Amino acid sequence: MKTGRILIIDDNEDLLKAARIFLKRHFGQIDLEKDPTLIPDLLKNESYDVILLDMNFTQDVNSGQEGFHWLDKILEIDPSAVVVLITAFGSVDMAVRAIKAGATDFVMKPWENEKLLATMLSAIQLRSSKAEVQQLKDQQELMREELDHKFKDIIGQSSAMIRVFDTIERVAETDANVLVLGENGTGKELIARAIHRNSKRADKPFVTVDLGAITETLFESELFGHVRGAFTDAKTDRAGRFEVANGGTLFLDEIGNLSPALQAKLLTALQNKRISRVGSNKVLDVDIRLICATNMPLYEMVQKGEFRQDLLYRINTIELTLPSLKERNEDIRILAEHYLEQFAKKYNKDIYKFSEATVKRLEKYHWPGNVRELQHAVERAVIMSRDNILQPEDFFFNASNQPKDQSEINLEQYNLEDVERILIRKVLAKHNGNITHAAQELGLTRSSLYRRLEKYGL
Ligand SMILES: Nc1ncnc2c1ncn2[C@@H]1O[C@H](COP(=O)(O)OP(=O)(O)OP(=O)(O)O)[C@@H](O)[C@H]1O
């Protein structure tokens, strides 16, 4: 199949027709236009691969000025347009000017068909590479926006979170070391990334090390790197995380888990701002902004001699304690709604809200796993639910962690259907899923119990 859409603009009708007859044999669509003032309209309705544009439209003016005017206009409308200029009065000078002005190529009247064809083919190829480049740029832009969005995406309107935002804003620009404290899943890493993104190091790397997951033997090589042959598995030279983070931010997660020996090694590197790869004597200067995080009680650990006080003072220039989710109860609804939107999209489900009883239930639960637990709970509920409104029973709470006074169901929060659903689920569980026994206890026939199971998606 012939492809390629070409627009020819010339005031010489004979030329237009001749060009069309020839080019039609090679390309998909050839549009002709005598009147250049119609160019903006034509480009509004169609995307041409190549525009063949005459330089002179007024018979007795041969300066090419009009051609240049329309060339500008076309490129203004579509900056990636591919324009080939035609003229009978061409000179090398004019060709150079045309290319400088943004034209792709230049052909002279009368043309040889084969030459014209070669010019048009390479112009079309250029157009498709330009389109590819543009597509890549668009993708990159989209990814950047997504990243920006992701890191800015710290949800919270509670006064506790507003204090956190305020601290981030004040410390981000400085190079001060920051210690982020908080329970599991409170968003320590998210905050660390936000600090990095808002700092002057934002275009340099943000490097994470999970100190809780690094073994004693690998610690030095992971953090400081190694040279080939430094130990049995060191097959090649390798930079450590300190080096990779140079100029950027190093995020040391779970710093409370470091053994005393490793605390000493880390402290030395931080004090000297220098490291050596394992197996090498060469000393490397490193410029990093340090952010550490832990859910352990570092101050108590210092008292008990489990964490070095000098290391604590090195890392805690600014200290930021993140509130647990329970301490910012008023954020639960917006966080849950945020995750509902995200997971409904991900799993392609038409679930758009929580029933009010559900929100109350979510707000009542104490969330030992904080935001991460809420995130997983909503994801699970979205996957399992057959309704388009999430109900309390779509959530399974960790009863063993639940404070006593919350394990009782408060019936006033629920409507009749909710109560029926909860009751059916309970009785079914009691009878290990035996429909006959459950139906007997509920005072229903087997078939009406089946109907209800269907209705509630149980
Ligand atoms: N305020 C918030 N807004 C939106 N998402 C959040 C918020 N806080 C935490 N999250 C999300 O919760 C999850 C856990 O966050 P993160 O890993 O930063 O917690 P953490 O405190 O570092 O956890 P851990 O101590 O277990 O390493 C992530 O998916 C994160 O995006």
Image (cartoon, rainbow, N blue to C red):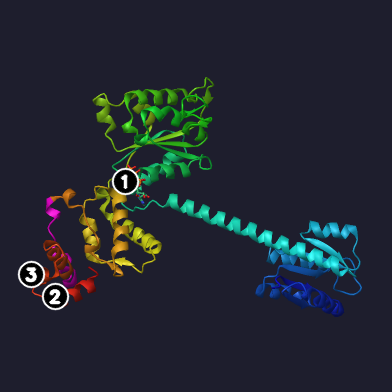
Question: Which numbered tag is attached to residue 441?
Answer: 3
Give left or right: position of 103 versus 393: right
- Residue drawn at (18%, 70%) of the image: 415
Mark 2 is on which residue type? Arg
**Beta carbon at label 1 within 8 Å of ligand 1:** yes
Q: Residues within 10 Å of mark 3 (few under 14, many from 20)?
A: few
* Magenta stretch: includes residue 411: yes
* Magenta stretch: includes residue 353: no
Instruction: State the image coordinates of residue 374 (x, y, percent, origin top left).
Output: 29, 54
Q: Which residue is mark 1?
A: 186
Q: Which residue is mark 2?
A: 446
As measured in the structure, the alpha-carbon distance from the residue carrying label 1 to the one carrying label 2 is: 46 Å
Instruction: State the image coordinates of residue 314 (x, y, percent, origin top left).
Output: 38, 27
Residue 132 to residue 161: above or below: below
Assign the N terminus to one quadrant of the image.
Answer: bottom right
Mark 1 is on which residue type? Thr
